[in-house]
Amino acid sequence: MKLYLYADKLSITILREGKLPLRGLAGLHDPFLSPELPLAAAPVRDITQAKFMAEVKRQYDALPEELSSLVTFEYYLQQAKHKRKEIEAILLQGAASEPLFLSPRFMLSLGVISLFESVESVALWRFQGDRHRGVALEIDSGKAGLMEGHYQGSPQTFKKVEYCDERPQTGAFGFSPLFQCATEFAGEGEWRLLRPLDTGQKQIQWDGEALSLCKFPSNAISAIIFGCAVDPELRDALTQLLQVDMRYRQLRTFQMKMSASRFRLNAEPLN
């Protein structure tokens, strides 16, 4: 499976080192991961007639056979109407579960790499590709070892982000807050790789952020795509690197260009 890693001038370091950048979870800039930020009060929910009827039917079906055989559902429903407030309280209690957050330990110890399915997304180039001035590296997830359950003897998780409006709730399994985003991001097709930060072979500071660089096979990169407004200095540096570094001399290169008739970007081959 081919996915894309968007980068700015950090792409030069990625290629020279042969390492992928693992950033701390704070680098996701996702406020829904932190319990320290203000949380809106849960809205008061009305119990519809349909939900009330469904709950009464559920309770009736749960009666022991010796009781249900003596009481019809119509009679049970008539009695339940006198206890509607109590039944609504049960339903509201079930709907008031707390949103799931990550523990401080996970926030400090785990790192993430974000890859994307699309290389022609205007939004991704704007927010992930340094406002169209950067590049995208085409990565074969299989060759890069992302599908494996371990890296350097430590566990790793590689999953596609699920896009939904409902937040994961208390009791949800695993690291679900890290693999769920709002539906407004659905067009990104994001995949996330989670590893312990200490699995990297080299630690660097980049633009004020601590990164952990992790080795991966150079043949896992199959192409490099220049943004439509790529920084000339970055383009020249990468072009020179591709010419002299034997690991990448066969790498395919592309240039993003604007469509003349649509608000779309197209990747055109350079070699």
Image: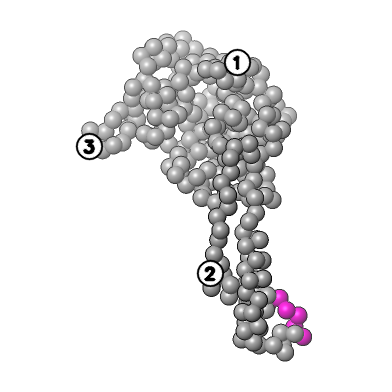
Comparing 240 with 48, the one in front is 48
Q: Identify the magenta region.
A: 61-66
Disc number placed over residue 261 in the picture, else none: 3
Select label 2 or label 3 by which is in front.
2
Please identify the quarter of the rendering in which residue 60 is found.
Answer: bottom right
Q: Position of residue 246 (x, y in %)?
A: 50, 14
Q: What whole-number distance in Å separates the C-alpha atoms at marks 3 and 1? A: 43 Å
Q: Position of residue 159 (x, y in %)?
A: 58, 41
Disc number placed over residue 48 in the picture, else none: 2
Q: Amino acid at mark 1?
A: Ile
Q: What whole-number distance in Å separates the C-alpha atoms at marks 1 and 2? A: 56 Å
Comparing 41 with 9, the one in front is 41
Label 3: state its secondary structure: loop
**Which residue occupies 69% across, 34% down?**
104
Q: Earlier in the sequence, mark 1 or mark 2?
A: 2
Q: What whole-number distance in Å separates the C-alpha atoms at marks 2 and 3? A: 49 Å
Q: Earlier in the sequence, mark 3 or mark 1?
A: 1
**Which residue occupies 49% across, 12% down?**
245
Quarter of the figure that contains the C terminus: top left
Q: Which residue is mark 1?
A: 204
**Which residue occupies 69% across, 88% down?**
71
Q: Position of residue 160 (x, y in %)?
A: 55, 42
Q: In the displayed structure, does residue 134 sit left or right of residue 156?
A: left
Q: Amino acid at mark 3?
A: Ser
Q: In the displayed structure, does residue 180 sit left or right of residue 122?
A: right
Q: Earlier in the sequence, mark 2 or mark 3?
A: 2
Q: Amino acid at mark 2?
A: Thr
Select label 3 or label 1 by which is in front.
1
